[in-house]
Amino acid sequence: MSSSFYSTTATNRRKTPSAEDPFASGSIRPDIDPGPNPRPVLKLVAFGSIILLGFLQFLPATHFRYPSDHLRNWLPFHTESPSALTKYGASIEGNSSFETGNDEDDGKVRIVSWMDCLDLRLLAVLVNSTLSSSRLEEVKEIVTNAISEVDYSVFIFEKVAPFVIPNVHPFLKKFIYISPSVIMKGRVEELIGSDLSNYAVAAAENCERRLSNLVNTAVLDAIQRSVSKPWVSEAPYAKNACIPDLNLLLIDSMKLEGDFLQAVLWWRKVLNQSQRSSIEKPAFVLALYKRYLKLSDPWLVREAPSSKITNNSMVISYDGPKRYCSKTGTDKVLEADHGNIWRGYLPLLADQILGD
C-alpha cells in the first residue's frame, strides 16, 4: 500500500503537458476581451488640457525663488514690500534672517556707499567708524557696496549713486547713503529712526554756501517764470537758500518720486546751456529744492572741521590719505593725509597692509 502511494505521486509529478494546452507551455495569454474604448468627451478633455498647458508656457513669469531662501518659497515679482524677502527668511546679505509677517520696516539699519576707485584704507575707516559708534550688533552685517548696471555716464556717479541704488536693489526700502570720504561718529540707528513724514530724502543743510553761489540767479528766475515742469518751483527761488549736503542722505525709496532722475537730467541740460562751470551739484540741489527733510546740524559733513566742531559732530570729513583713479581705472594717485582723526579707526598694522 505504501508502494502504490509513492508510485502514483511520482507519476503525477512526471506528467508532461500536452501539445493541445496553449497556456501550460508558458506562452503569453492573448486578450480574451478587447480593451474598453474611451469616451469621446474624455478624449476632448485630455486634448484640451494639453493645449491649455502648452499655452501657459508662453505666459510671463509671475513668481521667482530667492536664491538665499533655503525653504524655496515662491515670491511674486514687482512686490511693493521689500520685507517680502525677509518674510521667508532671506536677507540682503544672503543669510537667513528673522521672520516678519507684516509689511512694516523690519528694523534693520542699511548703510550704502559707493566709490569709483577702490581704496581699502578709506573703506576700512568708514566701516570701523560706523561700527565703533553703533550700539547694535546687527549693524555689523549691513554695510553694502552697490554698483549700478545702468549707464549714467553723463553724471559723476558718486552724486547719482544714492538715487540709482533703489532701482538696482528694490529690497532697500529705507537706507542711509554715506559718502566714502566720511568718518561716522554718531549712531546710525538714531538717524534711521528719523521720521521723514512725506519726504523721500533727508539731508543736513550747508549754509556756508547758498543757492546763488551755484547758479546764475537771473537765469534761474527766467526758467522759473517761463517753464512749467513738476520739478520747477511755482514760487520764485530763494536766492539765499541753504544747499543740502549730499555726503550723507537718509532715503526712503518707497516715497522717492519716479521723475527725480529725469528732473536732474533736465536741470543739467538747462544749466549747461547757460554756464560751463561744474553743474553736477546744482542739478541735484535744484531737483531737491524743498523736496527734502532737514536733518539737524550735527549731521552736516564739514570739509575742515575744528576740534570744537569735531566734538559736536556726528560725521566729519575723512582726513586720511586717498586714492584717485583715472577714467580708465588703471592709474592711481595717492593724496597725502591732512589730519590724524582717521588713525583712531584704523590700527597701524591694518594701515600698513591696506596701504600697500
Image (spheres, helix red, strand yellow):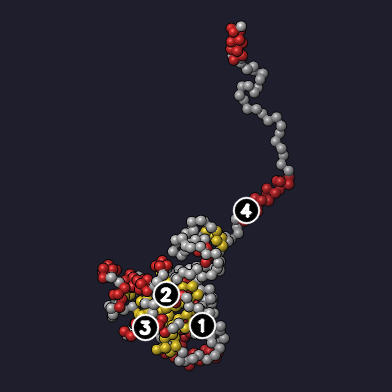
Q: Residues within 10 Å of mark 2 (few under 14, many from 20)?
A: many
Q: Which residue is mark 1?
A: 291
Which secondary structure, mark 2? helix
Q: Is residue 116 visible?
A: no
- In depth, the one of 198 and 21 nearer the eye is 198
Residue displayed at 28% across by 68% down:
350
Q: Which residue is mark 3?
A: 312
Q: Is residue 293 visible?
A: yes
Amino acid type assigned to the residue bearing label 1 in the image? Arg
Q: What's the mark number on residue 54?
A: 4
Amino acid type assigned to the residue bearing label 3 in the image? Asn
- Of the residues under marks 3 and 4, which one precedes in the sequence? 4
The Cα–Cα distance between marks 3 and 4, rounded to whole angstroms, is 67 Å
311 left or right of 266? left
- In depth, the one of 105 and 251 nearer the eye is 105
- Of the residues under marks 1 and 3, which one precedes in the sequence? 1
- Of the residues under marks 3 and 2, which one precedes in the sequence? 2
